[in-house]
Amino acid sequence: MEENKTSSQEPPKLVKRREHKNSTFQAGRTIGEKREKLETANERAAARKKDKRKKAWRIIATTVGFLCLIGALIFFCFNLMTNNDEPKPEESEVSYAPTIEVVDESSDGKITSRMREYIGQVESDLKSLGITPVRAVVPTGAIREVRFYLDGYTGYVKMIIDRGAGVSAEDTSRMLNYLSKIGVNDFEYIDVRIEGKAFWK
């Protein structure tokens, strides 16, 4: 009886808990979290490096573009200044020297260069209209009047150097065409000295 009591009064044995399964799970989870954190940190670092490279390339591209623009402006301004400094070729003035006979009936016998230039212009303009002048006469007492004798006509045409040579020649052509239409082939003179008006006798 005593032995049974003694055995019944012995303290219960402590049984060690099996923690290896739980601890292995916790350890695995911790390693995975650390790995994920490390991978995330690496990705962030790589992303930061990539952003830095992009920013650097943007800055380089902007700088190069700005320098190219400045260079183009400098080149344009230099060419503009160079072109302005270069002497421009002088425009060649057309000189009309008369080839027909020029008669001065005035007492001094001198014809000005302006008068000769005008006679040469009228001669050229009349020929371009199919009319052939043969002689130009500066009458006595006239300072600006010239009389043109034409081939095929007995009369002459009065002109004045104050009017343009071209318009005077055109008025002469119109008057000759008009007289031809009305059957007048012989006239003393045609007067085209007044702008917008023409007379014949």
Image (cartoon, rainbow, N blue to C red):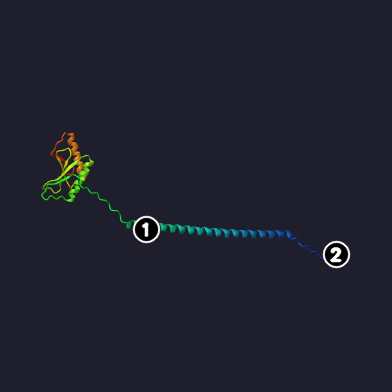
- Displayed quadrant of residue 42: bottom right
> Measuring 44% from the left and 59% from the top, which residue is drawn there?
67
Where is residue 5? Give x, y as percent.
86, 65
Q: Quick check: marks 1 and 2 in contact, CB under 8 Å?
A: no
Q: Earlier in the sequence, mark 1 or mark 2?
A: 2
**Label 2 Cα crowd, 10 Å radius (few <14 / some 14-19 / many 20+):** few
Q: Quadrant of residue 72?
A: bottom left
Q: So how many labels did they put on this image?
A: 2
Identify the amino acid type marked 1.
Phe
Name the one closer to the observer, 48 or 64. 64
Residue at numbered disc 1 = 78
Find residue 61 and report its horizontal and vertical position in percent.
48, 57
Q: Kindly identify the amino acid type of the residue bearing the numbered disc 2.
A: Ser
Query: Is residue 128 found left or right of 42 in the rendered image?
Result: left
Q: Nearer the viewer, residue 49 or 136?
A: 136
Point out the residue furthest to the top here: 183
Residue 164 as seen in the image, left or right of residue 4: left
Label ID, residue 7? 2
Q: Is residue 146 above or below residue 26?
A: above
x and y percentages locating residue 3 in the rendered image: 88, 65
Q: In the image, is residue 82 above or below residue 195?
A: below
Horizontal and vertical percent position of residue 178: 18, 36
Mark 1 burial class by Cα count in 10 Å: few <14, some 14-19, many 20+: few
Does residue 96 sit above or below 58 in this rendering?
Answer: above
Which image quarter holds the N terminus?
Answer: bottom right
Q: How far apart are marks 1 and 2 (CA)?
A: 118 Å
Per the image, label 1 sits on a secondary structure element best described as: helix
Q: Is mark 2 on a helix, strand or loop?
A: helix
